[in-house]
Image (cartoon, grey):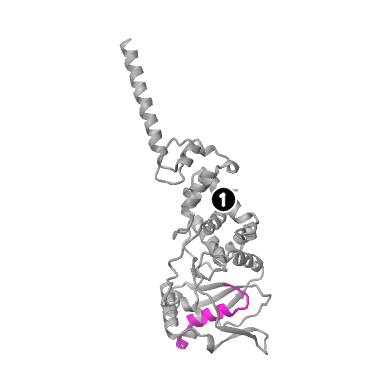
């Protein structure tokens, strides 16, 4: 009888302790979220929710959970990465999928929707092509246009544990070059407009930024001597922006001939033109140009930019590394990673 009484007493203590633990765990989340989920455990991860929530179907993720997850990736200086995607719990994945469908797939008047989202498979096809085309290279996208293509390619590298090629983005906006058709070959060539050229101070500031990004002529030549070529990728419409960027990069006439061996261009024309004269080896890719145009156009809003706008009048006053990644940007990245992972799992 005494043993039975002792056992009942211990059971009561354990039950009270468990209830106290549940209350402490619930305080780790906003009140609405904790109530909605009936939280049974608490971790440091903002989206490691309850075991009960793990069974939540994607279509039934509560608004409270969606808001809680969205808050983790909204208006932050930190970009959503593949490593973050991999660590998402099932309920986190479900919530992110609902949010990405809302922000990236639906059409509405606020223009937060992105029809390019439906062409993610084509983006991944071109990402695989560009990786195979330059197996030993350092690949840079100029501005926002090719940014999501290079993110998709980098994600494929990471999943396969490959170090090369490497991918990066370089910020550049505006143009101070004009295009013209050459009389002999009909190539689209470019010349600088003296009235629009950046000031000496602006040019110096931007070339310091290029050096920080590993894009000074000396750094490009050094990599080439070690067997790594540099490839510049861009979506080309008028073509003047890329010409202006190359004018800033190719700043030492004494190194130009050597630089032509170490650097090449891969461009996606949005104007239907197929012949360009940028004074560097150039590959014009038309197969997926429409896809890149869609991604460049629809992901060109401030809320979905991976690469900030960076005009000459900002070069000596703004640090392009201090770029905020909004929720839509991170949802776009999530959708790219999610599609890639689902294709790999088939």
Q: Is residue 63 visible?
A: yes
The residue range painted magenta reads 234-254
Q: Is 229 on the left-hand or right-hand side of 292? A: left
Give the answer, above or below, for where 239 lies relative to 79: below
Rendered-image quadrant of the N terminus: top left
Q: Nearer the viewer, residue 54 or 131?
A: 54
What residue would you read off at disc 1?
99
Above/below status of 131 relative to 68: below
Q: Position of residue 105 (x, y in %)?
A: 63, 55
Residue 260 seen in the figure: no
- Between 149 and 321, which is closer to the camera in this rendering? 321
Q: How many marks?
A: 1
The residue at the far top in this view is: 1
| Residue 322 at x, y percent in the picture | 43, 66
Q: Quadrant of residue 216?
A: bottom left
| Magenta segment includes 248 | yes
Residue at image point 46% right, 51% down:
72
């Amino acid at each position: 009888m005494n043993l039975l009484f002792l056992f009942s007493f211990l059971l009561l203590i354990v039950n009270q302790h468990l209830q106290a633990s549940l209350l402490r765990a619930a305080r780790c989340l906003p009140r609405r979220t904790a109530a909605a989920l009936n939280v049974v455990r608490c971790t440091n991860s903002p989206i490691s929710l309850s075991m009960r929530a793990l069974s939540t179907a994607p279509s039934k993720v509560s608004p409270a959970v969606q808001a809680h997850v969205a808050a983790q990736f909204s208006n932050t200086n930190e970009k959503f990465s593949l490593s973050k995607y991999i660590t998402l719990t099932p309920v986190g994945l479900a919530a992110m999928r609902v949010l990405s469908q809302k922000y990236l797939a639906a059409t509405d008047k606020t223009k937060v929707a992105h029809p390019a989202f439906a062409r993610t498979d084509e983006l991944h096809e071109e990402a695989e092509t560009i990786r195979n085309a330059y197996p030993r290279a350092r690949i840079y996208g100029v501005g926002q246009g090719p940014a999501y293509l290079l993110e998709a390619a980098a994600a494929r590298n990471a999943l396969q544990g490959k170090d090369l090629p490497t991918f990066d983005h370089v910020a550049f906006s505006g143009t101070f070059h004009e295009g013209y058709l050459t009389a002999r070959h009909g190539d689209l060539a470019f010349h600088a407009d003296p009235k629009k050229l950046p000031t000496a101070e602006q040019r110096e500031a931007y070339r310091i930024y290029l050096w920080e990004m590993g894009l000074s002529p000396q750094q490009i030549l050094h990599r080439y001597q070690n067997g790594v070529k540099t490839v510049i990728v861009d979506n080309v419409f008028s073509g003047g922006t890329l010409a202006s960027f190359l004018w800033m990069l190719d700043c030492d006439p004494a190194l130009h001939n050597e630089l032509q061996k170490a650097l090449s261009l891969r461009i996606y024309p949005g104007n239907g033109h197929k012949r360009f004269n940028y004074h560097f080896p150039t590959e014009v890719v038309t197969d997926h140009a429409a896809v890149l145009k869609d991604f460049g156009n629809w992901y060109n809003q401030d809320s979905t930019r991976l690469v900030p706008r960076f005009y000459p009048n900002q070069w000596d006053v703004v640090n392009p590394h201090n770029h905020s990644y909004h929720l839509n940007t991170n949802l776009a990245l999530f959708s790219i990673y999610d599609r890639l992972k689902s294709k790999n799992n088939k």
